[in-house]
Image (cartoon, grey):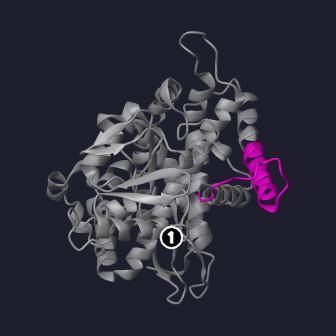
């Protein structure tokens, strides 16, 4: 469980069935694998469940943002942020997605076809640029440093998940010092964005940052504190670029393994675009490319595990779920449940043809979670990945280094442990 939790959970569900006990000292952990059980936790009885202790440790970095907050406070913050992710807003953001991708392709044009590079690093820089510009109207001055600070924080918190006892952050251990330095980089970067926006009161902005800064409590009329704004910004920025970057990484990896599927994707892009720059309407017409993305997120879901904890005793299909139990739902394992997915390890985008989706249990597939706390940026991420793939694959063939190891790194999101080494060939 410590070394490879996604594989451990999958193997034990295959062996023992839809609900299993995980042997963790001092705490009862259960993992559920049956879609109807998951629906019960996330929808039918969701008011009885809060985030589990492991997820709550994310507040060490993210504070009390949408991912970690609970109850009425979470509902208020969600209402404030939701309009930023409406369909029309996302269509407006598509232009920024295209501009940032074109900037990356301009740099790629300077590369030699024989020059291998870390594709995963480029995807992380690209998606962080898109998130910062689209959500906050900001240019990040030191993108790579911010990305490394986020990765340091995420690795620190993931390690904390797996510890029974955690050394207080004020103790100057090597890991604590690295984490605190990383948090300082993130906090300073976010504060610079807020300070810059406040120095331009005469300019009108219509992005998420404006909504956060202008929000007022219905009862008191008070706005958000700088700390609240920071927590929401760092949460949405972290989730916003991590999800898309890893989705793109795993997409390029899988396309490299399946040249016949790549050929179909490229043909669709060329047929729809006819050599022109894509519009939001064009991207929505890339139905097969979208199926490929859905299949990538089946095998490599952005959030490979989701946790909840019941406030009061609950019963699921006759099983007692005592108050305080950590309930794990692992999309990585769920998406390989042979009761719902034939030949589950096979990469097959046809699984997501509309008629097949209709016949499948809604909670057999949940790369972005489910219920009231379904990821607020789901449609943003999908549009972003479609935009990047449309531009990249219309111009380049992306080849992966055959001997470079590709292993899972199950942090908060599912990363390629050693990155992805690739080179590009103009079409």
Q: Is residue 114 above or below residue 36?
A: below
Badge 1 crowding class, 10 Å Cα cut-off, few under 14, some 14 to 19, many 20 or more, is: few
Q: Residue at x 25, y 45 (%)?
A: 318
The one nearer the camera, 302 or 270, is 302
The one nearer the camera, 381 or 275, is 381
Furthest-right residue in this view: 172
Q: Residue at x 43, y 44 (%)?
A: 375
Query: Where, quadrant-wise, is the C terminus in this rendering?
Result: bottom left
Could you tell me residue 293's position as x and y percent? 36, 62
Query: Which residue is the site of mark 1?
Result: 4
Q: Residue at x 50, y 44 (%)?
A: 52
Could you tell me residue 118's position as x and y percent? 60, 75
State whether residue 99 appears in this view.
yes
Q: Residue at x 71, y 29 (%)?
A: 226
Q: Is residue 250 above or below residue 357?
A: below
Compared across the picture, whether 258 is left or right of 425 comes to left
Q: Is residue 117 above or below residue 373?
A: below
Could you tell me residue 327's position as x and y percent? 42, 48
The one nearer the camera, 220 or 68, is 68
State whether residue 137 appears in this view.
no
Q: Is residue 329 above or below residue 394?
A: above
Residue 36: in magenta span: no
Q: How many numbered tags mark residues here?
A: 1
Within the image, what quadrant is residue 179 found in? bottom right
Q: Tell me where the magenta segment starts and ends, as one range.
A: 162-189
């Amino acid at each position: 469980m410590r070394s490879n939790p996604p594989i451990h959970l999958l193997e034990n569900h295959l062996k023992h069935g839809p609900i299993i006990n995980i042997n963790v000292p001092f705490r009862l952990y259960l993992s559920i694998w049956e879609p109807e059980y998951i629906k019960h936790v996330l929808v039918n009885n969701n008011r009885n469940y809060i985030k589990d202790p492991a997820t709550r440790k994310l507040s060490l970095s993210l504070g009390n943002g949408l991912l970690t907050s609970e109850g009425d406070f979470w509902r208020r913050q969600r209402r404030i942020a939701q309009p930023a992710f409406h369909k029309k807003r996302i269509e407006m953001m598509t232009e920024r997605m295209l501009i940032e991708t074109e900037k990356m392709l301009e740099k790629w044009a300077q590369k030699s076809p024989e020059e291998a590079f870390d594709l995963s690093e480029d995807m992380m820089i690209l998606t962080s640029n898109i998130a910062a510009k689209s959500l906050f109207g900001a240019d990040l001055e030191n993108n790579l440093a911010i990305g490394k600070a986020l990765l340091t924080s995420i690795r620190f918190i993931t390690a904390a998940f797996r510890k029974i006892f955690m050394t207080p952050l004020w103790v100057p251990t090597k890991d604590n010092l690295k984490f605190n330095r990383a948090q300082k980089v993130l906090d300073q970067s976010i504060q610079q964005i807020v300070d810059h926006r406040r120095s331009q009161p005469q300019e009108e902005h219509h992005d998420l940052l404006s909504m956060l800064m202008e929000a007022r409590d219905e009862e008191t009329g008070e706005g958000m504190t700088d700390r609240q704004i920071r927590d929401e910004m760092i949460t949405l920025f972290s989730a916003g670029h991590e999800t898309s970057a890893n989705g793109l990484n795993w997409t390029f990896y899988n396309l490299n393994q399946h040249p016949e599927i790549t050929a179909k994707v490229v043909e669709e892009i060329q047929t729809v675009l006819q050599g022109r720059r894509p519009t939001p309407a064009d991207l929505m017409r890339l139905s097969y490319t979208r199926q490929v993305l859905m299949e990538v997120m089946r095998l490599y879901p952005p959030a490979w595990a989701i946790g909840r904890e019941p406030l009061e005793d609950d019963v699921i299909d006759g099983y007692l779920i005592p108050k305080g139990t950590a309930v794990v739902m692992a999309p990585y394992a769920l998406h390989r449940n042979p009761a719902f997915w034939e030949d589950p390890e096979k990469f097959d985008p046809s699984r997501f043809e509309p008629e097949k989706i209709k016949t499948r249990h809604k909670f057999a597939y949940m790369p972005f979670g489910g219920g009231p706390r379904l990821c607020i940026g789901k449609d943003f991420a999908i549009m972003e990945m479609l935009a990047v793939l449309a531009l990249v694959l219309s111009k380049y063939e992306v080849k992966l280094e055959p001997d470079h190891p590709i292993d899972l790194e199950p942090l908060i999101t599912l990363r390629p442990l050693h990155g992805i080494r690739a080179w590009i060939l103009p079409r």
